[in-house]
């Protein structure tokens, strides 16, 4: 358990193909919270399987520590940051490290495609979670019993997941508000010209009516049903009903 008299230690595990925006949207609110509070509330650390410089898809990146037990002691929360196609990513060393963290009762989570890596390692069973919309249907096909939600972020007990991109800022706002109050969370949000922290259950994409410029409510409902059943398409009779 975290000692409230010290800063919260958050580890970010970077995997090949991660997006810099997804990571920055998680890290920068924590830095701003430290600055606004006048002392360190959050201590961020960066890891990868082998350590060293981990470049993002844009070229910029972070120096990381290798995944080993000595480097990962004392962490309160560990988030896997993944982009590209996480369904194709497999690294036994990462899976072993995540399971060790689970045994140590460290809270786990994923940003963008990170939840897919956790799920494939067997660490999301019985937990509600989300991930980037492009990975939802492939993961449902891979494991139909998983409790996946099409939300921007989901916090379920000891699991913290978000869809990536700017959704990470909304999840960190919820984390800050829970530990240090809504006032500080709002101040951090205003710092980044992000005037409204979105709630967890808001959709990842614009609704079909907006996306396709639909104006009839029945037609919008039909397209909405089709777009949310890509993995298990509805028949014309079901849509009509």
Image: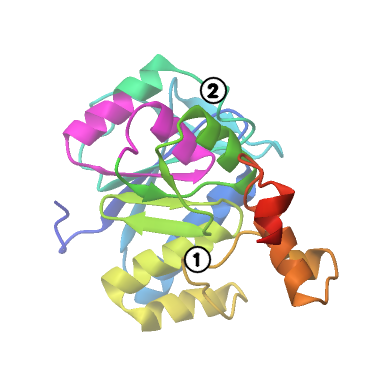
Question: Does the magenta-highlighted stretch encompass residue 32?
Answer: no
Circle 2 crowding by C-alpha within 10 Å: few under 14, some 14–19, many from 20: some
- State whether residue 82 is above or below residue 195: above
Label 2: state its secondary structure.
loop
The front one of 133 and 174 is 133
Residue drawn at (56%, 53%) of the image: 24
The front one of 159 and 104 is 159
Residue drawn at (19%, 59%) of the image: 6
The quadrant holding residue 143 is top left
Q: Give percent across and percent down for residue 41.
A: 31, 64
Q: Which residue is mark 1?
A: 170
The quadrant holding residue 68 is top left
Circle 1 crowding by C-alpha within 10 Å: few under 14, some 14–19, many from 20: many
Q: Give percent across and percent down for residue 74.
A: 20, 42
- State whether residue 216 is above or below residue 20: below
What residue span does the magenta drawing correspond to?
A: 97-125
- State whether residue 32 is above or below residue 127: below
Q: Residue furthest right?
A: 213
Q: Give percent across and percent down for residue 137.
A: 59, 39
Q: Which mark is residue 139?
A: none
Residue drawn at (31%, 21%) of the image: 96
Residue 171 visible within the image: yes
The quadrant holding residue 82 is top right
Spatial distance from mark 1 to mark 2, Cα to Cα?
A: 26 Å
Q: Residue furthest top?
A: 92
Q: Which residue is mark 2?
A: 89
Label 1: state its secondary structure.
helix
Question: Does the magenta-highlighted stretch encompass residue 105?
Answer: yes
């Amino acid at each position: 358990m975290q000692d409230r008299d010290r800063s919260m230690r958050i580890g970010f595990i970077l995997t090949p193909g991660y997006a810099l925006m997804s990571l920055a949207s998680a890290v920068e609110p924590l830095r701003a919270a430290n600055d606004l509070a006048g002392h360190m509330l959050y201590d961020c650390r960066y890891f990868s399987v082998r350590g060293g410089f981990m470049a993002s898809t844009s070229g910029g990146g972070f120096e990381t520590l290798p995944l080993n037990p000595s480097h990962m002691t004392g962490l309160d929360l560990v988030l896997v940051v993944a982009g590209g196609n996480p369904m194709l990513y497999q690294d036994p060393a990462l899976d072993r490290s995540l399971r060790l963290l689970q045994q140590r009762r460290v809270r786990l989570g994923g940003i963008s495609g990170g939840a897919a890596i956790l799920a494939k390692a067997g660490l999301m069973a019985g937990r509600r979670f989300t991930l980037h919309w492009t990975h939802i249907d492939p993961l449902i096909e891979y494991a139909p019993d998983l409790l996946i939600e099409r939300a921007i972020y989901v916090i379920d007990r000891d699991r913290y997941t978000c869809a990536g991109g700017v959704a990470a800022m909304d999840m960190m706002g919820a984390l800050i508000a829970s530990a240090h109050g809504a006032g500080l969370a709002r101040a951090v949000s205003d710092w980044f010209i992000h005037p409204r922290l979105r709630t967890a259950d808001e959709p990842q994409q614009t609704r079909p009516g907006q996306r396709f410029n639909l104006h009839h409510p029945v037609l919008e409902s039909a397209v909405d049903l089709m777009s949310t059943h890509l993995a298990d398409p509805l028949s014309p009779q079901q849509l009509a009903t």
